[in-house]
Image (cartoon, rainbow, N blue to C red):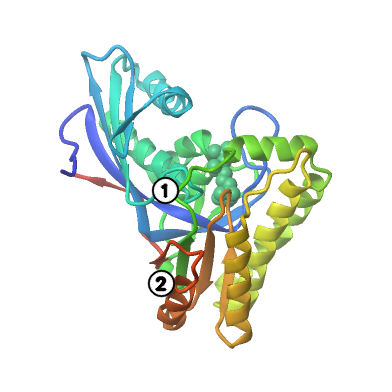
């Protein structure tokens, strides 16, 4: 049954996952979790997290359940840190029970932390009677996981280098693209993006070049989007993803998220493109490929990608909405 928040101390929020078209990889110095590069994402209609937060007087610690499984350790610590910052703002002393559900595999590189922390930030703020303005929700989510800042907003969203909160750039209707998420594994990722990007910054000789080049790639992505130019946008998103992966592959020891099946799908996307379809790929901290195309090509692209033996399933998505409360 779907939980619904009601009354003081209890709220439920939904936030949608986002996929970066211009990637965030790397943090500014300091411990505020500020991004070292600008990023730009599309919020996805098809993938979301629903989170209920209940502040309960009887609890002796925060409790977390994700997809019906109780969680502890690092996952619970990150949630408690976000709740602590809100408790400090309003003098609340109660602990909370947090129940979260994804409609897609958790921690497999499908941006579950982005939608998860955005939904948590909104639900917890509402449960405590604090501001639910989306720029504040975005800032709170960013402190937990920088890509989560972008999931506060729908459509196309930017997170500038060093920014505390994301900015809604363009509504989905401006350029209603289709993102085809090709799921290539149900396993959790081998190394968290937080650890992998710190390790890249510390040991990759290509990291300074990545940080220096990222604003140019961001500008190309932004302009392709503004002009509704799929070829310009598509070539820029592939470049951003490959530059990010190159920076981590050059870390010592290397970080490699791409699997043989990832390369197979990337080359299939390029083969389809050579056949005349405007379709472009991007990859995050996991093996999956996300392919971007125009809505009129989505059905054919989905059929072609689903037919590959490496592909477990394809989730097509249009641009999604702002994070919101359920009442
Ligand atoms: C590859 O937001 O997970 O998905 O701020 O350390 O929590 P932390 O990192 P996280 O990194 C996401 C990186 C990425 C690219 C992107 O979403 O921009």
- Residue 229: tell me if it is visible: no
Q: Label 2, on which residue?
A: 173
Residue positioned most to the bottom: 276
Ligand 1 contact, mark 1 (Cβ < 8 Å): no
Residue 209 visible? The answer is yes
The quadrant of the picture occupied by the C terminus is top left
Please, is residue 216 above or below residue 32 in the view?
A: below
Residue 96 left/right relative to 192: left
In what element is the residue under mark 1?
loop
**Numbered disc 2: secondary structure:** helix
Q: Residues within 10 Å of mark 1 (few under 14, many from 20)?
A: many
Q: Which residue is mark 1?
A: 152
Q: Residue at x 52, y 34 (%)?
A: 143
Residue at 40% in and 79% down: 299
Judge: label 2 CB < 8 Å from ligand 1: no
Residue 258 or residue 209, whichever sits in front: 258
Q: Quadrant of the N terminus?
A: top left
């Amino acid at each position: 049954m779907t939980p619904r928040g009601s009354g003081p101390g209890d709220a439920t929020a939904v936030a949608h996952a986002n996929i970066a078209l211009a990637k965030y990889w790397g943090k500014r110095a300091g411990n505020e979790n500020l991004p070292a590069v600008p990023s730009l994402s599309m919020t996805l209609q098809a993938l979301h997290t629903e989170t209920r937060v209940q502040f309960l007087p009887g609890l002796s610690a925060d409790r977390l359940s994700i997809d019906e499984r109780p969680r502890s350790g690092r996952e619970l610590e990150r949630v408690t840190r976000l709740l602590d910052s809100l408790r400090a703002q309003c003098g609340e002393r109660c602990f909370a029970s947090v129940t979260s559900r994804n409609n897609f595999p958790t921690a497999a590189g499908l941006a579950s932390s982005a939608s998860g922390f955005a939904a948590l930030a909104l639900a917890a703020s509402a449960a405590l009677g604090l501001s639910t303005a989306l720029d504040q929700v975005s800032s709170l989510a960013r402190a937990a996981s920088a890509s989560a800042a972008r999931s506060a907003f729908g459509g196309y969203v930017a997170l500038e280098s060093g920014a505390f909160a994301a900015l809604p750039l363009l509504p989905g209707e401006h350029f209603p693209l289709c993102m085809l998420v090709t799921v290539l594994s149900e396993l959790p990722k081998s190394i968290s993006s937080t650890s992998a990007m710190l390790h890249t910054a510390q040991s990759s000789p290509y990291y300074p070049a990545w940080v220096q080049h990222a604003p140019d790639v961001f500008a190309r992505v932004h302009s392709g989007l503004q002009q509704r130019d799929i070829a310009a946008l598509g070539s820029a998103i592939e470049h951003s993803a490959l530059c990010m992966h190159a920076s981590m592959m050059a870390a010592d020891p290397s970080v490699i998220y791409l699997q043989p099946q990832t390369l197979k799908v990337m080359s299939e996307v390029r083969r389809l493109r050579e056949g005349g379809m405007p379709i472009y790929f991007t990859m995050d901290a996991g093996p999956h490929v996300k392919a971007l195309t125009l809505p009129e090509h989505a059905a054919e692209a989905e059929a072609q990608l689903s037919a590959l033996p490496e592909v477990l399933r394809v989730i097509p998505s249009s641009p999604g909405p702002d994070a919101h409360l359920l009442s």
